[in-house]
Amino acid sequence: MTEMRTDQNKKEELQAENIRLNEEETAVVILDQTKLPGIREFLSLDTKEECFDAIKTLKVRGAPAIGIFAGYAMYVLAKQWEKLSVEEFIKKLTELGAYLNSARPTAVNLSWAVKRMLRVAESGPEKSDNSESAENRQRNAESVLTGQQTKEANSAAEIIARLGEEAKMIQAEDIAMCRKIAEYGLSVLKDGDGILTHCNAGPLATSCYGTALGPILLGHEQGMNLKVYADETRPLLQGARLTAYELEQAGVDVTLICDNMASIVMKNGWVDKVFVGCDRVAANGDAANKIGTSGVAILAKYYGIPFYVLGPSSTIDLDTPSGNEITIELRDPDEIKTMWYENPMAPEAVNCYNPSFDVTDHSLISGIITEKGIVYPPFEENLKELFS
Ligand code: MRU
């Protein structure tokens, strides 16, 4: 189902409506990010295939956003099974979680949200402190795997109500976390700074403010003069289509550059800091983010520019020891060869390597900015400390 809107230039719409439930809470409504910036099209999704496809084809994208979306998707789809026994319901929900989780492998937020929803279905709501500890996450993940049930529900309807609450809580927490990340991030910026960013880690990739763009949007709101260089971010152009759009809509001074221009703007002395998002941060601080990020980090090191990774603590995966163990998503070569051009830009049969993410080595990262504070090296030690 498609709902077209035309006159939407309002920042609050970007922030609040990119993922939400419809009024009856029977569908998840998303702003289709593949159509931006030209068309603002809202999609109302109520089948598991539509939800899977939305993640896979990046209609909804950005690590925190796909976690929030998966929570809502599990809730609305589970509502269709109200008549099932608790046992059958949990079985179907587990299958649904695995199916949605298989849509994209790199961002940990997707599996994190799926596990959280399953845990709530099986064990009942837990006290959420907005920021599960690594230990809690481990314990909870284990209880899902072992099927251990601490607060068994009496009916599918009861579980559905829990799922609704939890999905809304995931989004509310994300909004609060992004605000905190924005505040911590702002503490390393000063008036007049030039900031280079890669991909899109703005409100569209979360629920509000975003991660890497959060401090910039907050600083701008407070009257700071910040200048942003947005890498266009090949092959899917999230920087050109989404970051440039969000910053321009907010009135921030933004200049779009091709990915291979990062070096010259750094050499020109126009970049004081690099801010990027993340899809998974390993226990040693290695950070997976959109393809091209590690090249930007290497350049920043060369030019002596601080390189910050910004993300919620749900993106930190202490169960993954280093970047070597992070699965990198490979995508359709047509994203490179044909997708953005009237005519194909490459020979039809040419081999293509199209990894969606790369891993920035922790030695290139100046700090990881989370809602709980800024983590500095040594990351192995300090990330563990963050959850203790
Ligand atoms: O493939 P995408 O567009 O989902 O990749 C997204 C990124 O790499 C973002 O920078 C990351 O998810 C952080 S979003 C706050």
Image (cartoon, rainbow, N blue to C red):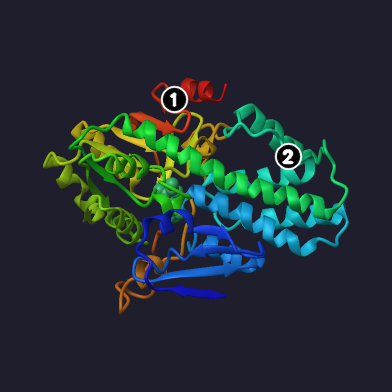
Residue 57: x and y in percent read: 50, 65
**Residue wearing tag 2:** 125
Question: In the rendered image of this protein, does residue 221 appear above or below residue 83?
Answer: above
Residue 155: x and y in percent read: 86, 52
Q: Is residue 46 visible?
A: yes
Residue 144: x and y in percent read: 75, 41
Question: In the rendered image of this protein, does residue 362 appear above or below residue 61?
Answer: above
The answer to whether 279 appears left or right of 10 in the picture is right
Q: Is residue 101 visible?
A: no
The Cα–Cα distance between marks 2 and 1, rounded to whole angstroms, is 32 Å
Mark closer to the chain start, 2 or 1: 2
Q: Residue at x 20, y 37 (%)?
A: 193
Q: What is the number of the mark on residue 62?
A: none
Q: Quadrant of the N terminus?
A: bottom right
Nearest the viewer among 292 and 166 is 166
Nearest the viewer among 237 and 362 is 237
Tag 2's secondary structure?
A: loop
**Residue wearing tag 1:** 379
For label 1, the crowd category at 10 Å Cα-Cα, with few meaning under 14, some 14 to 19 and many 20 or more, is many
Question: Which-is-in-front pick, marks 2 and 1?
Answer: 2
Which kind of residue does numbered mark 2 sit on? Pro
Q: Residue at x 46, y 75 (%)?
A: 4
Which kind of residue does numbered mark 1 sit on? Phe
Q: Residue at x 27, y 43 (%)?
A: 220
Residue 329: x and y in percent read: 49, 53
Residue situated furthest left in the rendering: 268
For label 2, the crowd category at 10 Å Cα-Cα, with few meaning under 14, some 14 to 19 and many 20 or more, is some
Tag 1's secondary structure?
A: helix
Question: In the rendered image of this protein, does residue 78 appear above or below residue 379?
Answer: below
